[in-house]
């Protein structure tokens, strides 16, 4: 019986010691103050830059008649909120009429056009023009041809007109290339055409 009593007393003492340790631990843990600093997190929002350009034209029928200007109005537009960019324009002629004027073989253009003001010819890339466009919250419109026309000389003869081979075509293309991280318009043109 003594053995059982000693065991019961030992269990009671162990339980009492455990309870005391628990109370002391809770009391000590509850009263300990930690120095804590928690600043607000920084949230970085990344947006994607974008450039949107369009090319439109309202005229669709073109007829070569001596002394008559042909209305041709291609317009390049850099849309609102596009990033700073180089806007390139490239007119390409196919079967474009040129006429022999001397026995030596020099030619003259009796059907011609001029590039609108504000375009700069890209050196050394002949036939490519550009302009720098700054970001805006509005669409930016740029005419391609001066006075939106192709001029036909009044000296164009019926024989010369009849001698035009193939169908004369004037193709206009525009390209908008980001300005940021480009050293020059020439570099932007090369990178855009390397893809």
Image: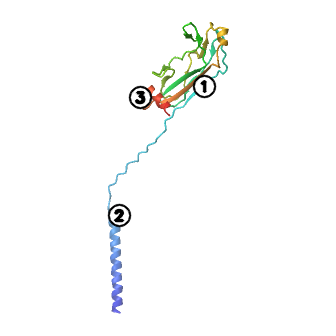
Q: Nearer the viewer, mark 1 or mark 3?
A: 3
Q: Nearer the viewer, mark 2 or mark 1?
A: 1
Residue beneath label 1, please? 56
In the rendered image, residue 85, in percent from the top left (x then y), is placed at 48, 28
Q: Name the residue: 33% across, 92% down.
A: 2
In the rendered image, residue 129, in percent from the top left (x then y), is placed at 50, 22
Taking depth in this image into account, of 36 and 105 the one nearest to the observer is 105
Separation of residues labelled 2 and 1 (CA atoms): 75 Å
Tell me: residue 103, above or below residue 180. Answer: above
Location of the N terminus by quadrant is: bottom left
Q: Could you tell me if the residues under marks 2 and 1 are in contact, i.e. CB atoms within 8 Å?
A: no
Tell me: residue 13, above or below residue 87. Answer: below
Q: Secondary structure at mark 3?
A: loop
Tell me: residue 187, above or below residue 10. Answer: above
On residue 78, which mark appears?
A: none
Mark 2 Cα within 10 Å, few/some/many (few <14, many 20+)?
few
On residue 30, which mark appears?
A: 2
Q: Name the residue: 51% across, 25% down.
A: 88
Q: Nearer the viewer, mark 2 or mark 3?
A: 3
Q: Name the residue: 43% across, 30% down.
A: 182
Residue beneath label 3, please? 183
């Amino acid at each position: 019986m003594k053995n059982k009593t000693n065991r019961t007393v030992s269990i009671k003492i162990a339980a009492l010691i455990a309870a005391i340790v628990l109370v002391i631990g809770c009391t000590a843990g509850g009263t300990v103050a930690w120095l804590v600093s928690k600043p607000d997190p920084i949230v970085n929002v990344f947006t994607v830059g974008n450039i949107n350009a369009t090319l439109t034209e309202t005229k669709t029928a073109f007829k070569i008649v001596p002394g008559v200007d042909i209305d041709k109005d291609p317009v390049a537009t850099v849309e609102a909120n596009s990033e700073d960019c180089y806007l390139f324009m490239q007119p390409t002629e196919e079967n474009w009429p040129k006429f022999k004027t001397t026995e030596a073989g020099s030619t003259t253009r009796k059907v011609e056009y001029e590039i609108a003001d504000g375009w700069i010819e890209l050196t050394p890339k002949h036939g490519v023009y550009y302009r720098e466009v700054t970001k805006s919250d509005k669409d930016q419109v740029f005419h391609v041809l001066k006075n939106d026309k192709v001029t036909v000389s009044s000296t164009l003869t019926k024989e010369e007109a009849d001698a035009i081979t193939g169908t004369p075509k004037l193709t206009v293309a525009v390209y908008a290339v980001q300005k940021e991280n480009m050293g020059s318009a020439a570099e932007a043109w090369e990178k855009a055409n390397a893809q």
